[in-house]
Image: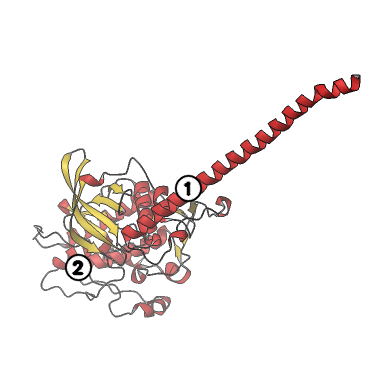
Amino acid sequence: MGTRRYISNRLPDELIITIACIIGILLFAFIFFLIYHFRNQKSLRRTLLATRILATRGISNLKANQLYRSDIDPKTRKPLMEDGCRRFPTEGTISTIISSYYDDQCEFPRENLTIGHLIGKGAFGFVFQGLAKNINSKEKITTVAIKTVRDDATSEEIENLLKELSVMKMVGKHTNIISLLGCCTKGGQVMLIVEYAKYGNLRDYLRRKRPSGHILSGSFEQDENDNAYKQDDNDDLIQSLTTIDLIFFCLQIAIGMEYLHSKKCIHRDLAARNVLLAENRICKIADFGLARDLTQTYYYRKQTDGRVPVKWMSPEALFDRKFSTKSDVWSFAILAWEIMTYGGSPYPSIAAEQLFDYLKNGNRMNQPANCPNEIFQLIEL
């Protein structure tokens, strides 16, 4: 009797424990289902967002499911900073790339921006003149330059523009560096908003101001990577340029490059076409599409092929793909030669394919006719 009473008292407790276990298992399964469902919905939303971005940009060579990869292990990705520049997975999404560069302090409202006429274009994008409302505390409406990519730009081209944005933010403001005023990265085409230089790029300005009797040391052939800004229609600087003016251009650019290097940044594409001329003949170094941050390394080694400004590159950059502040100094010497020849094209009789052997044999460009010996000695160094 005692044993039977003991069993009857134990049965309710065991039943309660069993029921509790079953409920716990069911509850755990339900929570797991909710998490799994939520993640699938989140992935679907990201894919749909990427698809909409593709549709608005006209990119047809990528599939929507290639734009978001949830199975990529973050530990296997390359670091965000490598060789001094930001890196991302090769199979990242356009939306993820853009979000990685988002900066609320730099973002400018699209509704306050009016895009005007085209003032420059390159292989991958365009530069427009525009008007920005309240982008500058000193004036209500500011004339700006707007840099953007083509409608059918690839994710790599969009990221390159965003890298340029990152470099310009890092460099900051200087009289002889074109300043970043803002950007638009959300809700449409990626756009960089920068200072507007009224008189366009220095190369074309020099060519317009070339004396009528001047014998040019170089042709006006189309230069590599020619995406230079065009001149303003109202070019009121009609007076001719003196040798002192040309030397002053060189000095301003040297000051700007000294500042750039002090920020641990190399330009890699320094040329007259990438220097803009603002009011009062102020030179402003621009086009940081190839610029790299050297904070962590002494020099930057280019790992991939692509269109590069061969005639402005130093021997070590040409032969070994090594870029440093010294390679920028070489490019500055070529730029100084451009200035002293009123926009002449470097190595006018040498094809780009022949330049390797030409430099290896110790050949250099001749002294321009109006270039003082002291200036040419600097160019030769």
What is the C-alpha distance between the residues marked 2 and 1?
61 Å
Picture quadrant where residue 10 is located: top right
Considering only vertical position in the picture, is 174 above or below 365? above
- Kind of residue sitting beneath label 1: Gln
Residue 71 position, x and y percent, is: 55, 54
Report crowding for label 1: few under 14, some 14 to 19, many 20 or more residues within 10 A (C-alpha): few
- Kind of residue sitting beneath label 2: Tyr
Tell me the quarter of the image containing the N terminus: top right
Q: Nearer the viewer, residue 116 or 10?
A: 10
Q: Is residue 336 left or right of residue 96?
A: left
Q: Nearer the viewer, residue 73 or 308?
A: 73
Q: Which residue is mark 1?
A: 41
* Mark 2 / mark 1, whichever is N-terminal: 1
- Do we see residue 178 in this rendering? no
Picture quadrant where residue 153 is located: bottom left
Considering only vertical position in the picture, is 379 above or below 47? below
Residue at position x 55%, y 42% in the image: 35
Name the mark on residue 171: none
Residue at position x 34%, y 59% in the image: 55
Q: Nearer the viewer, residue 208 or 225?
A: 225
Q: Is residue 18 left or right of residue 192?
A: right
SS assignment at label 1:
helix
Residue at position x 38%, y 58% in the image: 160
Q: Which residue is mark 2?
A: 342
Picture quadrant where residue 214 is located: bottom left
Q: Nearer the viewer, residue 19 or 226?
A: 19
Considering only vertical position in the picture, is 367 above or below 153? below
